[in-house]
Amino acid sequence: PLFCMQVTTKDTLSAGMDCLPFYRSSPACGTGDHAILFGNRSVLNTRQQINGLTSFLDASTVYGSTPAVENKLRNLTSKEGLLRVNLKYYDNHREYLPFTDQIPSPCAQDSSGGERLECFLAGDSRSSEVTSLAAMHTLWLREHNRLARALARINRHWSALTLYQETRKIVGALHQIITLRDYIPKIIGPDAFNLYIGLYTGYDPTMNPTISNIFSTAAFRFGHATIQPIVRRLNAQYLEDPELPNLHLHEVFFSPWRLIKEGGLDPLIRGLLAHPAKLQVQDQLLNEELTEKLFVLSNNGSLDLSSLNLQRGRDHGLPGYNEWREFCGLPKLETHSDLNTVITNNSVTEKIMELYHNPNNIDVWLGGLVEDFLPGARTGPLFACIIGKQMKALRDGDRFWWENDNVFTEAQKHELRKHSLSRVICDNTGISKVPADAFQLGKFPQDFKHCNDIPGMNLEAWQEFYQEDELCGAPKSVENGDFVYCSESGNSTVTYTCHYGFQLQGEEQLTCTSKGWNFEAPVCIDINECENEINPPCPPSAMCINTKGSYKCLHTDLYKLAEDGRTCIGNGCESTV
């Protein structure tokens, strides 16, 4: 539903409108006004918002957050466990993301004409929002396929599923390392890192790793104030290229064609490495490309990202700035003078008090954003607290965290520690010189190193020495499934699994005996989810239709489930899960 933002007569964005459009976040089914549709009539059932992504730092941006999306991203015909790539366009023989199956997609097109180019398909649906984001998604696609091919060369006995999952595990670990070791300390500062995160002591089953509303709706949106208004594209000497001039940010919104037609990844990534993020200053938080020219696919005009952030916090019912300071053990601010103790720019505090009248009324996103930075940080004490607490929960509440016991061998962990974002860039682009730390700004060439001098992991730590069992031979493959082969102390076993939406019929694990494999290989058959009477996949008002590996909910009431199978949206067509 609409939750319009009121505008003044002087507002240049409104174009004569009384308000700017704003669409509320979809409620979790069974909460708020939708509770009655699911048999819950309690007035205490507060509206909650869906987190459509996995909470964990698990590289879901690469692999998706649902099995259905994951299957779209995988190259299921590959024997090397690869991800799908664009089969039509290449970046100097390097891979691009595939295009979305939604044709025509809503992405912008080259005004000078030429062939239509659709939005990219990646683990996160926002991958085409700006070209630099698309470049990072492409970088990790290439890294997965590079690692998978390398693992296939040293472990020729590994199945496609083993190669895919082992590579995914490595890429997930790299996301965890790069985020928590290389990025977060620079954002919240060393003192806050030690206070809220500290050293890793192992998995804590009592820790809730759920992404908090305050983190996603306010604190981590600090990054919007670090976005530069100019997109720079640099040549191999890190100089501006007359053939690829700088672009205003609004010129790259939803424009994947620029990546494919205008130089590929390398110029964009050089621009990111050699120029700083926007300096976040209290009297100029977001640049005008975001406040005057923001383009979103659901709206024909321009929007204001700062207004959207404020309204999103209100949409989600976030408590105010002072409530969150109290949550973090910080003193509440009662007066203008109190506010000046955390925001030293008096002209800014005067404007805030003029608008809000009392510190208790301040929206948490704005209040946290304008606080003075902590030493060695890019955030103030409130956002450092919220981000730090969230990162600790994500780390300690994840039993698959890369440092946890038995997730990787000690030799593998030793190799993973060597890797960095700079190494990922070296391995997957034509860039030959990078900073040792991709998050630390330096001057070219004195602060840059040749890729030959950037350390990286040695995959020999993942090598298994395999000798095909003379008695049983190679395991038999299965359609819509895969297997993992293990051999230890002369005993060989093979364990079968099925793809999402299929179930195993037959023995899950086979053992090699003197007479051969002790059982015939199983088969993977389609699951009829519609026959589940205990936990039916569709709400009572919908008809369930079984499909191969999945199902559909056909709705006849006012609401239907969105593609994720959980979100309530207005009914216009059938939904596929």
Image (cartoon, grey):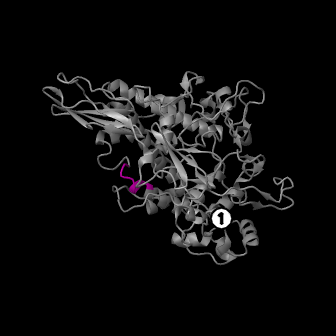
Percent position (x, y) of residue 462? 32, 33
Q: Identify whether 537 is placed above or below 348.
A: above
Percent position (x, y) of residue 50? 55, 56
Q: Residue at x 59, y 52 (%)?
A: 560
Residue 52: tell me if it is visible. no
Q: Residue at x 39, y 32 (%)?
A: 480
Using a 10 Å C-alpha cutoff, classify the residue at mark 1 as few (fewer than 14 neighbours), some (14 to 19) or many (20 or more).
Answer: some
Instruction: Please give left or right for residue 398 compared with residue 349 in the image.
Output: left
Residue 288 vs residue 105, the one in the foreground: 105
Q: Identify whether 537 is placed above or below 495.
A: below
Percent position (x, y) of residue 65? 49, 45
Q: Identify whether 543 is placed above or below 5.
A: above
Q: Is residue 399 magenta?
A: yes
Residue 224 vs residue 18, the one in the foreground: 18
Q: Secondary structure at mark 1?
A: helix
Identify residue for label 1. Answer: 314
Instruction: Please give left or right for residue 11 compared with residue 574 in the image.
Output: right
Percent position (x, y) of residue 191? 48, 61
Instruction: Please give left or right for residue 176 compared with residue 251 in the image.
Output: left
* Amino acid carrying mark 1 in the image: Arg
On-image quarter of the N terminus: bottom right
Q: Is residue 346 magenta?
A: no
Tell me where the magenta segment starts and ends, as one range. Answer: 394-400
Label total for image: 1
Residue 482: tell me if it is visible. yes
Q: Residue at x 75, y 66 (%)?
A: 347
Task: Give residue 41's quadrant in the image.
Answer: bottom right
Residue closest to the far bottom: 334
Residue 194 vs residue 137, the one in the foreground: 137
